[in-house]
Amino acid sequence: MVKVKVTLAGLFLAVAVVSAQDITWEKVHMDASRVGASIPDRDNVGQAFGRVEGDTYYAPNGKVYTGGSLPDVARIMIEAQPAMAPVKEILGYTTHVLSRDGTELQNMVVDRIMATAHEATGLRIDAGVTNRFGIRYDMPEGKVIADDIISMLPFKNYICVVSMNGKSLREKLERMAAHSVEVLGGIEMTVKDGHIKKVKVGGRRLCDNRIYNVATIDFLLEGGDGIVMAKDAVDLIQTNVLIREALIDYLNQLNAEGKPISYDDKARVKFVGQNKTGKE
């Protein structure tokens, strides 16, 4: 096991790495009363971190520290900020937390995968599939910066389009119903006791003989999280677009239009007699 702890101005993000599915993220607020520092945006480093002149550190709370390690630490943190500017970019604002386990955020992510797949390939996209465990962190309330999205979608998962017949798509959905239903787009499904009772794609009954273009990610092509999206594929296109890049582009678009970050939170899978993992 590898543990990484990054400390920044009174807030740290701890990551414990065992495997992709076992990564956990936790934000813990820490007391910053000694110097009054806060996490800076791209353009307010001096206000958030203060300044260093020679061996003297002028802290944001007005205290002055001369000598010792504090001025050296402050200098390192301040000098690192220009390189960190891209991840400090403000992408927009939310009025509430979008939970990683909630349908609002999950719908947003999979729909952006579908929309970006269409933009990148020009193909009609009928459905989308991504993994719930790939969304590692909530989208915070209030200001959302690029680093929030990188933390939320930390893996380098590239968007793909897999073409398959309806029978193959049904088999994959049946396996999810029996084990763990993932994040779905363009699909409405009712699951009872681990079996599909009803399924529609694009508002129409799933047809076994029809070819469907399914947007997904490369991690799921050959067995990631137990899903083999490439099995029985009649065609496969891999793009060079990461999920997080697609989502960042979308949030920038909303921000440019002056719109808050929000999304449809309607559940696309209905469970009867079981929880959302497809298990009793």
Image: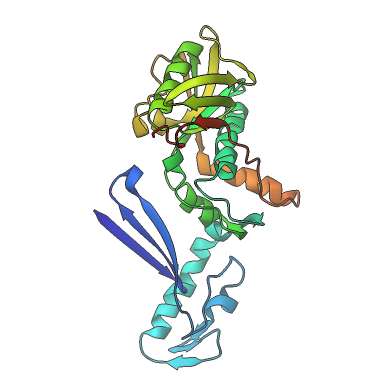
Q: Based on the displayed image, in which of its 4 quarters is residue 133 positioned?
A: top left
State the image quarter where residue 128 is shown.
top right
Q: Nearer the viewer, residue 198 or 135?
A: 198
Q: Residue at x 42, y 17 (%)?
A: 171
Colouring scheme, one of rainbow, by chain, secondary structure, one colour: rainbow
Work out which quarter of the rendered image holds the C terminus and state it. Answer: top left
Residue at the image position 43 percent from the left and 89 percent from the top:
55
Any part of residue 160 in sight: no
Q: Residue at x 34, y 28 (%)?
A: 223
Q: Position of residue 58 (x, y in %)?
A: 52, 88
Q: Which image quadrant is residue 65 in?
A: bottom left
Indicate left or right for 82 with 124 as reference. left
Image vertical order of residue 235 relative to residue 12, above or below: above
Q: Nearer the viewer, residue 174 or 257?
A: 174
Instruction: Using the rendered image of the protein, determine whether residue 139 is visible from the camera's viewpoint.
Output: yes
Furthest-left residue in this view: 1
In the rendered view, tell whether residue 92 sits above or below residue 217. below
Question: What number of labels is visible?
Answer: 0
Q: Residue furthest top?
A: 209
From this view, report whether residue 140 is shown above or below residue 165.
Answer: below
